[in-house]
Structures are given as C-alpha cells and as structure tokens.
Image: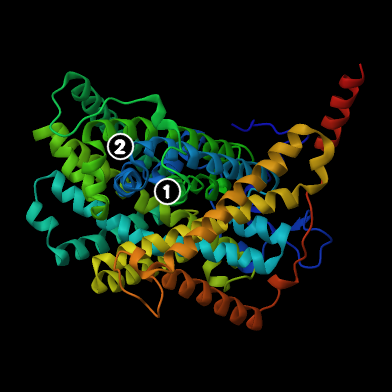
Amino acid sequence: MAADTPPETAARTATATTARTATTVAPGTADGADRSTAPPEAARAGALKADAIGFLDALAIGLNATSPAYSLAAVIGPLVALVGVYAPGVLLASFVPMLLIASAFHFLNRSDPDCGTTFSWATRALGPTTGWLGGWAIAMTGVLVVGSLADVAVGFGLLAVGADGLAGNALVREVLTVLLILVMSWLCVRGTEASARFQNLLVLLQVVCLVVFAGVAVYRVYAGTGSLDAVHPAAGWLNPFGAGGSALTGGLLLGVFAYWGWESALNLTEETKDSANAPGRAGIWSTVVLLATYLSVAFAVVAYAGTAYLAGRADTEEDVFAALAHEVLGGWDWILLLAVSTSALASTQTTIIPASRTALSMARRHALPARFAHIDARRGTPGTSTWWVAGTATVWYVVIHRISENALADSLTALSLLIAFYYALTGIACAVWYRKRLMRGLRPFLLLGAGPLLGSALLVWLLVESVADMADPRNSATSTAWFGLGAPLVIALFLAGAGVVLMLLRRASSAAFWRERTGTHRESESETESAAGAGARGAV
C-alpha cells in the first residue's frame, strides 16, 4: 500500500473554510498552481461546511459507497461462471489497479483538495476539455446506478421482513424505489454530519451481517452439514490466472465494478477534518478493507455453494444471495437479506455525493451553469446539484425499468466503462501533474508516476476489451441488438455523445472555463524546506 507521506510531497496546509471551498484556477494563470477565489455567485450562495466529518466517517462513507454486500451479490455468480473457484484470485487481482488509482487520488488530493476530484485534477494537469469529460463521467455514474441501488434496497428489504409478495410486485417496488431516492437525497441535503452518522450505523450493520453469514457458511462446510455441493477452500483459489487469460479479462471488469465507489470519501474532502490527508487515507484504506471483506465472503460462498450452483445462477445477479441466504442460514436468512438491503441503501445515499459535489465543482469553475454551485448557507450542502442528480437518476430509473429489468442490468454494465474511463484519467493526471518530481528518487517515481500509470494502463486495457465484448448483443442482458450493437455499449456511447454535445453548448455560451491553462505541481515553501532538510541529513 502506498505510504501516507510520499517522498518530497508534503501536505498542503488546509486553507480557511471559504477559501478552500471556493478555490478555482484563475483563467490565464501560468500553471494553475496559484488559485483565486470562486466566482461571486458561488461565494454568495454559501460554502460547504468545513470539518463536518472525520477520518472514520470518511472511511465509512467510502466503504458504503462501494456497497460491499450488494456488489458481491451482483458479481459473484457471473464471476464464478467465468473463472470458477478462482473468483477470490480475480478479486485479489482487481484490487491492484484499485490501490494504484486510490494512491493517485490520495496524492492529487494533497495538492488540490477539491470536491470535484477527477474533474479538477484532470483540468489542471490535462486541460479543460479532458477535465470536463471526466467530471461528466462521474456525474453520469450516479445517474445510472442510484435507481438500481434503491431498487435492490427495497427488494431485499421487503424479503427480509417476509413481504415476498410485495417484493415481486414491479409497481410497488418502483414506487418505493422513487420514494427512497427522494428520502436519501433529502438526507444528503439536510447535512453532512447527519449523513455520516447514518452511514456509520449502516456500515456496522452490514459488516456484522456479512461476518455472520461467512462464518456460518465456512463452519457448515467443515462440519459437513451444508445443503449444496460444498468444497473445502484452497490457497490455489487466489491464483487469478487459473482460469486462463480470456476469462480473466471479463472477471477483472467485474472486479473493478465491485471495488468502485471508495472515492466518495474524497468528494467530501472540503467537509472533512485534515482535508489534505484524511480523505485520501480513507480512500486507500477503503480498498484494503474491501479486499479483506471480498476475499473472506468469496471463499465462504464458493466453498459452500460450489461452482455449478453459482454459475447456474449467474443471470440472476444479486438474487443469488437471496437463494443462498436460506441455504446457509435457514430461518435466519433475513440476516443476509438485511445485509444486502442495508448495503444498497447506504450506497444509494453515498453515490449521490460524488455526482452532486462534482457538479458543484464544475459550476463554480464556470464549466456548468452557476445555479449548480448554490450551497445552502445554513446547512452547508449543495442542494441544487443534489436534487438535480436525484431527479435525473429517478427519471432514468423509471424509463429504463419500464423497458425491462434486463435493460436496467445493461445500464449497470455500461457503468463499468465510465468507471474505467475516469479512474484511468485520474492515474494519468497524477503522473502528469507531478512530472517534475518523478526523477527525484525511486519512491516519487513509483508512487507518483509508475504506479498510477500502471493502474491506468490496466484500466484502459479493460476498457478496450470491454468495448469489444459489449459490441456483441449476445453478451448483453437483453440479448437484443440496439442499432446493431449490444445495449450496454449503446447506452455508454449515448451518454458520452450527450456529454460532448453539452460541453460544446456550454463552451459556446460561456468560454471562461476553457481559458484555463494546464500546469504542474509547484513546490510550496514548506516542501522546499522539508526537501532541504532531508538533503542535509543525507549529506551528514
């Protein structure tokens, strides 16, 4: 894991609340390192509430945004269908690019603690157009997945309380899902502290339920009391190459989806104590905790159920956990059902956060209309952008859900392309932003350059492979061609095209953002003194 203190990269001292919240690169500056205050409309609207949450709150939000129980439920069947017992190994391999990109997020946040994360960093390092597209990708991930998460939370919640009939009623689930999106959005607007307290409760409940399920499953495997084709776990399951290269490609893509979401902690950087360090550490530790959780539960599930059972239910996605809950826990199956419901419920809220904060950051840099930069002066939360995300996500969910459940699944598959894109963009931005420091030693070269670029290269490879795979309609949930292509690829291309069109329209109406120029990390006075001191000690 990357060290918290990179070589010759000291944390930038956090600025005052208003200045830190309102920072923006002044158009025409030499390299973007000296930043001016935000546009007047953003300052008048208020500022995000500084020091609202701490490191543990950020960690809980990063974990819940990933939705461990739901993510495992969604990917374990398809993953086993691809790689068999080597599913834990693929989850381990997927962790590598995630850790490398999490490290890039950490170091970029130390230089620029901005709630827009990839948008802000890519703009400063790679240019306004690239930054805008990165911000758009983040916003659209929220739109694509919020409705699906809320739907899963409702469905598993009803199953957990024994309301199976209501869970099977599409209209009831749709209405409850919309209501849940509105409630979670209201909680986001109500205050970051309230959101953090709610997330702390949900992550504790989710982890306890998963530990109980995994523990019982493993015990029954070794006790010989399992009801399915149990097999004893083996260390060889950690070999990601056991199933072959082609299977590994698809498995890694599923793994990337499973880990996605931890960066929500960094979208709250301006509202977190020690904003230059704590959010980045929370993001890195989120990936580590997720790795431990995924490996333990994956070992338990594969050992108890066997590969044939899981592969045979690959098309049912998260519903495989509903079946496994009864097989493993019997009358106590509500424990696992509650874990998945809680996981999806928490992620419904935390997925709104990065999309809304990114829109806020884009608006105060004039990349979006000024109204998206409005912040409630009393609560210190971005109400306008939050409700925009909620409204757009609700419309998307209702329209796609009315088409079919399979179309909803295809929209989630399209999500993986957007994730790989902006994660890869962040790794590249890190290496470019710190390019003048890469030759100062092995550690800066690895942590600020080679590591992030390797993570980006892996994600770009997955992106290309996924596009080729999604072009075949037979690989989609609907198995129906849309314009001659698979539905997930069409959805991804539609969103990308819409983003380009909106970007051009915005540039035509207000070109201020596109006058910003790229730059490189500028060493602060404190960093110079630290480097000089280190050099002196080395000379001694």
Q: Is residue 23 left or right of residue 231?
A: right
Q: Classify residue 537 by image quadrant.
A: top right
Q: Is residue 458 left or right of residue 296?
A: right
Which tag, 1 or 2, sits closer to the chain's start?
A: 2
Give how far apart the Cα atoms at labels 1 and 2 are: 30 Å
Residue sitting at 43 percent across and 46 percent down? 255
Which residue is nearer to you in this view: 501 or 387? 501
Q: Position of residue 347 (x, y in %)?
A: 36, 49
Amino acid type of the residue that numbered disc 1 sits on in the rendered structure: Ala
Question: Is disc 1 placed on a helix, strand or loop?
Answer: helix
Question: Is disc 2 placed on a helix, strand or loop?
Answer: helix
Q: Position of residue 238 (x, y in %)?
A: 43, 31
Q: Is residue 398 above or below residue 71?
A: below
What residue is shown with label 2? 206
Amino acid type of the residue that numbered disc 2 sits on in the rendered structure: Gln
The tag on residue 140 is none
Q: Spot the residue most to the front.
A: 244
Q: Classify residue 204 by image quadrant.
A: top left
Residue sitting at 61 percent across and 40 percent down? 103
What residue is shown with label 1? 247
Local packing at callout 1 (Cα closer than 10 Å; few below 14, some 14-19, many 20+) is: some
Q: Position of residue 430 (x, y in %)?
A: 69, 49
Local packing at callout 2 (Cα closer than 10 Å; few below 14, some 14-19, many 20+) is: many
Q: Is residue 96 above or below residue 416?
A: above
